[in-house]
Image (tube, rainbow, N blue to C red):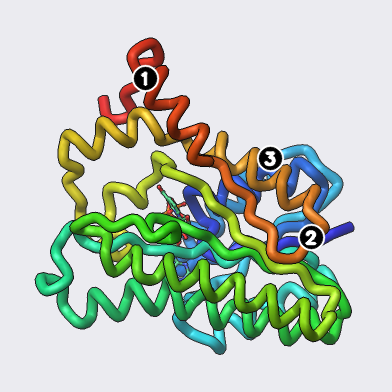
Amino acid sequence: MKTVVITGSARGLGFEMAKLFKQNNLNVVISDLKEENLKNTKKELDTIPSSSKVEYCVCDVTNSTDLQNLVTFTKEKFGAIDIWINNAGVNQPDKAIWELTEQEIDLVFDVDLKGAVMGSKIAMEYMLQQGHGAIYNLEGYGSNDAKMLGLSIYGTSKRAITYFTEALAKENEERKTNIIIGKLSPGIMITDFITNALGNKEKIELPEKTKKVYNILGDYPDVVAKFLVEGMLKNTKNNAKIEWLTSSKAAWRFMTAGFNKRDFFK
Ligand SMILES: NC(=O)c1ccc[n+]([C@@H]2O[C@H](COP(=O)([O-])OP(=O)(O)OC[C@H]3O[C@@H](n4cnc5c(N)ncnc54)[C@H](O)[C@@H]3O)[C@@H](O)[C@H]2O)c1
């Protein structure tokens, strides 16, 4: 039976992916900042009929000892890590670059960029001993070089994640490691993430024009998770990109927006 580890999975996309992996009979280790949230999430996951199991492990991805502990914990519980997903993320406050404090900038880079870099490094070290495995990183706004006031530091980290993930895939190819690396591109999801900055420290008031775009392009995370999890379960290629909101899908959504009215913000 295969095992998947998902960082930042007490809620949102991570939680939805955990549900689907469990439905597909993979053991799942959920991890996040707070034990209480993980306990509640595990309770919900335990109600899903499956031959596999769910365990939880507190892990702050900005702390490499926690990441190492997440590997050890999973090894002890399940004996292997087949898929590792660096999903934990925080949004930035809706401010221009020069209005952000150094601490705000640090947190976004530490979680969204360095957390995934260290998560990949530590998972790689284990998977090399094990002889196989797959690591996925989350793309996001900025990955494709788009720019927008209020998302520049987040976008800088996601643009870097794209480069980093491709570089990691290339290194694995050159070293012929048998480990596959991939990018998950979830588009826009209606989760707490879009209205909360820096974890839940600050509310984001979305401007009406942003809400309009989100109503056209956005989806609930369960819909996106289904697509991403099916993609990961099928994928055998290194340097894969599993992309939900392709440019043709986005164009179709804009073309049909008049007939397909949605309001996620009622
Ligand atoms: N929501 C979107 O529109 C969107 C779009 C593109 C990409 N993404 C990316 O998808 C991923 C999941 O986003 P989501 O929408 O489910 O967000 P979310 O806010 O619902 O969930 C993120 C989770 O990460 C956890 N987390 C935050 N800091 C952490 C830390 N230091 N260590 C461990 N866990 C931590 C949070 O507690 C939370 O459970 C993120 O990487 C995000 O950047 C989101």
* Cα distance between the residues tagged 2 and 3: 33 Å
Three-letter residue code for mark 2:
Lys
User: What residue appears at the point 59 percent right and 71 percent down from the top-left corner?
Assistant: 165
Q: Which mark is residue 257?
A: 1
Report whether 223 appears left or right of 130. Answer: left
Report whether 76 appears left or right of 181. Answer: right
Q: Is residue 222 above or below residue 149?
A: above
* Element on which disc 2 rests: loop
Residue 5 visible in the shown view: no
Give the residue pinned by disc 2: 237
- The quadrant in which residue 67 appears is bottom right
* Element on which disc 1 rests: loop
- The quadrant in which residue 89 appears is bottom left
Q: Position of residue 183 (x, y in %)?
A: 60, 60
For the N terminus, the image quarter is bottom right
Report whether 93 appears left or right of 141. Answer: left
Three-letter residue code for mark 3:
Thr
Q: Which mark is residue 47?
A: 3
Residue 235 visible in the shown view: yes
Closest to the observer, 86 or 164: 164
User: What residue appears at the point 54 percent right and 87 percent down from the top-left corner?
Assistant: 64
User: What residue appears at the point 40 percent right and 34 percent down from the top-left corner?
Assistant: 217
For the C terminus, the image quarter is top left
Q: Residues within 10 Å of mark 2 (few under 14, many from 20)?
A: few
User: What residue appears at the point 71 percent right and 46 percent down from the top-left corner?
Assistant: 231
Q: Residues within 10 Å of mark 1 (few under 14, many from 20)?
A: some
* Element on which disc 3 rests: loop
Q: Position of residue 70 (x, y in %)?
A: 64, 77
Report whether 195 appears left or right of 71. Answer: left
Q: Earlier in the sequence, mark 1 or mark 3?
A: 3
